[in-house]
Amino acid sequence: MAFNDVMLQLSSYPEPTPVAAVEQAVDFAGALGASISALTFKIEIPNVGNVLANKLLDIPGMIAAERQKSVANARDLFGAFESMATKRGIVHQPIMVSCTTLQIPGIVTARARMHDVTMIPIGEQAEQQQYVAECVIFGSGRPTIVFPEAPKRSNSLSLDIVGVAWDFSRPAARAVADALPILQRAKTVRVVTITPIKTMDTKSSGAELTKHLAGHGIEIVLEEEEAAGRTIEQALEDYATARSLDLLVMGAYGHSRIRDFILGGATKTIVANPPLPVLLSH
């Protein structure tokens, strides 16, 4: 098993994904020796208004300008993407799809099923991106990496130090299995359990995980982090910062009801504002 093809979802409207986020994803593909596809959209805006409004405000012209804005943003993103990937010698493919904004989550989810991992950059005011991430996490059957549009550190995504949030749950086990290609490449793998947690034998759990990963050639450092009044997500963020993690691996908790997603507290906070690249599996 390996990550051979990465998909990067980019926003073209109303504001484009920052170029810094594109560079992070290209670096990630390069670190894994994988190809990368960049998916973005030509936004179709429905015609609205009436005869009088059209004459007074030129609504058709305004709509045409907004459509062109998404196309121009997409082309600029593709230009940066192709330049970075070519410079690094990475096999790459730009993909543009025409659709409305409401169709984006379903399109990204469907395409994510045919890629080893999907990367979704999250900005501070990017509710649409958050919803896309939720759809992909719970609907694609593949791992998803959410990461901040603006990187917290200036160095490239090396994947040297990888952390695993471990609580012996099904989502955590799924995340570990999905992340094996990354864990095998990492120089250091730190497995952390936030305590106190649900009733479980943490020592036995850690020993079993150590043995399991050793069978895949992965040596781990087992640690516990006291919550000490913090939320799990805050404890994980503090841990990631203190250990200079390049990537955090964790299970995604929650379930979906048609188009509504019910997320666990830590998952919801991480997806809304990832402090670093986070691989999530459900």
Image (tube, grey):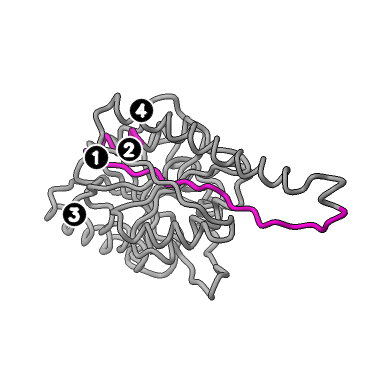
Q: Is residue 204 above or below residue 145?
A: below
Q: Nearer the viewer, residue 97 or 229?
A: 97
Q: Residues within 10 Å of mark 1 (few under 14, many from 20)?
A: some
Q: Which of the marked residues, 4 or 2, is nearer the chain's N terminus?
A: 2
Q: Which mark is residue 32?
A: 1
Q: Amino acid at mark 4?
A: Met
- Which region shows up in magenta? 26-52
Q: Amino acid at mark 1?
A: Leu
Mark 4 in CB contact with mark 2 (< 8 angstroms): no
Q: Is residue 86 above or below residue 226?
A: above
Give the spatial CA distance, label 3 vs label 1: 19 Å
Magenta includes 58? no
Q: Is residue 51 shown left or right of residue 61?
A: right
Q: Is residue 274 shown left or right of residue 29?
A: right
Q: Mark 2 highlights which residue?
A: 28
Mark 2 in CB contact with mark 1 (< 8 angstroms): yes
Magenta includes 48? yes
Tell me what residue is drawn at x 77 percent, y 48 percent. Answer: 59
